[in-house]
Image: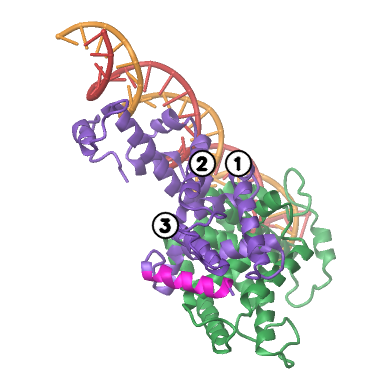
Chain colours: A green, B purple, C orange, D red
DNA sequence: AAACTCATTATACAAATGGTTAATCAAAGC
DNA sequence: GCTTTGATTAACCATTTGTATAATGAGTTT
């Protein structure tokens, strides 16, 4: 990663091109100092996302996260306080990004939308958006899965803070589809995990898919095929 | 766990009730020594299954595994050589047990079977068996998932040794359902992960399900509902 | 009962890990 | 230009972890 572009062995520099890159220096002029601070924090967070999602909380070391971000490991305490806090910040980032990029209940369809889609097409569009989100950010499902396989304080916190809300929205989405006759009248929680599981596993296990099937879920055409398959199965 | 029933602080004992428990002392009479050895090895393996499946390879420590099994941590090297070998032994156990308990292509239905089930009922029965397997042994999917989220030598080994074979059988199963018109003619790998994901996520994330939805996937009635939902969605 | 086997334990060790503190040094403010 | 601020680094510490080796002692064999 090394977001801090080409760090020289010792200190930090290249502050010039940092602010030269973005010409948006106006409202509360962002110091090259604050810019760099922002970049460092973001680099750590992104590395944490990657490492935690691939190795879990226990398996991912803060030193590896720091090394991957190209910063000194002491900076993790400086910016995030502790490993636990860093993990929570990572989870918060994931769910806030998801909320920004994807909405389960609203009309969905990134920009336009609602311009006369049948309920069935509406459902298709939302599911399509969800699969695309999973394809774009596989580390979200990976990280959460790592934590949801056993009960812990972290899971409790994540459940209370984020998962419950997401679950409620998914529940309403499923119930809507049931009212429309698109989904069968069976257990709602079961349906939720059936939908989520069928949408995300393909991307969560992408390394396995590549090795065993010789295809790459990150490939646009492959994802298109997956969406086609998912919709053919789920939306009758 | 502590399979070695009620270990006294120091050494080992209770060899008497150990062989008194099973009256099958005939062909190569199992020493109380060999019996105990078998039990210790099995205890370590089971603990490894649990710890690895919940924390991953990096996150699960051999000392925790030993402690959970109620044995000295040095025994892990004695019985399995190294942490890596123990992990491979655990994976081998998982896939051999799966092969013994579940078959994807054969008529399935544990005992009888094939006595005139329609192709649709046949598909239903196989899927039902698979969901029951996931419910019975959630650590299988958990452990494999932990390893399949990133490429590694372990994933490569598992893919070559076990996953590829399972994938081939799943592929043939899906193609059969497609020929029967039960599944749509879309990407086979996508369908495989859709089926697997929709079947197992509910059990893989059981701790989350309990906390967020207040139901327990291990509950028989809950699993029945999940099977009903899965079949209603997948087998049209 | 004595000798032997080997499953188990005690102990050690280097490396890795999460966390803490003081030093450093470039940018910001004067 | 000089001082101040604070982002970054160096060094350190107590634990944990994987691995290795020697000691132990119960069960088996003779």
All told, the count of numbered labels is 3
Q: Earlier in the sequence, mark 3 or mark 1?
A: 3
Badge 3 local density, few (<14 within 10 Å), some, or many (20+)? few
Describe the element under mark 1 as helix, strand or loop.
helix
State which chain disc 3 sits on. Answer: B
| Disc 2 and disc 1 in contact, CB within 8 angstroms | yes
Q: Main secondary structure of the magenta part?
A: helix
| Disc 3 and disc 1 in contact, CB within 8 angstroms | no
Residue drawn at 48 percent across, 30 percent down: B81
Residue drawn at 74 percent across, 69 percent down: A30
In this view, B60 is above or below B230:
above
Query: Can residue A148 be seen by looking at this rendering?
Result: no
Range shown magenta: B221-235
**How far separated are the C-alphas under marks 2 and 1?**
9 Å
Describe the element under mark 2 as helix, strand or loop.
helix
Residue, disc 1: B161
Describe the element under mark 3 as helix, strand or loop.
helix
Image coordinates of residue B35 in percent, x first then y, are: 30, 32
State which chain disc 1 sits on. Answer: B
Query: Can residue B16 be seen by looking at this rendering?
Result: yes
Please tell me whether residue B225 belongs to the stretch shown in magenta.
Answer: yes
The label on residue B92 is: 2
**How far separated are the C-alphas under marks 3 and 1?**
23 Å
**How far separated are the C-alphas under marks 3 and 2?**
17 Å
Image coordinates of residue C1 in percent, x first then y, are: 14, 9
Image coordinates of residue A69 in percent, x first then y, are: 67, 52
């Amino acid at each position: 990663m090394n977001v801090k572009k080409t760090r020289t062995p010792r200190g930090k520099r290249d502050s010039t091109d940092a602010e030269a890159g973005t010409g948006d220096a106006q409202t509360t002029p962002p110091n090259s100092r604050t810019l760099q601070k922002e970049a460092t924090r973001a680099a750590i967070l992104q590395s944490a996302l990657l490492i935690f999602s691939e190795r879990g909380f226990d398996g991912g070391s803060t030193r590896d996260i720091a090394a991957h971000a190209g910063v000194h490991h002491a900076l993790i305490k400086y910016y995030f306080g502790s490993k636990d806090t860093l993990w929570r910040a990572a989870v918060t980032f994931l769910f806030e990004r998801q909320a920004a990029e994807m909405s389960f209940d609203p009309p969905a369809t990134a920009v336009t939308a609602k311009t006369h889609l049948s309920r069935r097409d509406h459902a298709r569009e939302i599911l399509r958006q969800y699969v695309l989100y999973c394809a774009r950010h596989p580390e979200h499902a990976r990280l959460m899965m790592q934590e949801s396989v056993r009960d812990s304080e972290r899971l409790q916190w994540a459940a209370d803070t984020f998962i419950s809300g997401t679950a409620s929205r998914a529940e309403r989405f499923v119930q809507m589809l049931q009212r429309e006759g698109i989904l069968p009248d069976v257990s709602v929680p079961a349906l939720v995990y059936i939908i989520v599981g069928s949408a995300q596993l393909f991307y969560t296990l992408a390394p396995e898919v590549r090795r065993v099937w010789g295809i790459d879920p990150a490939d646009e055409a492959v994802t298109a095929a997956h969406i086609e398959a998912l919709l053919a199965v789920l939306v009758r």
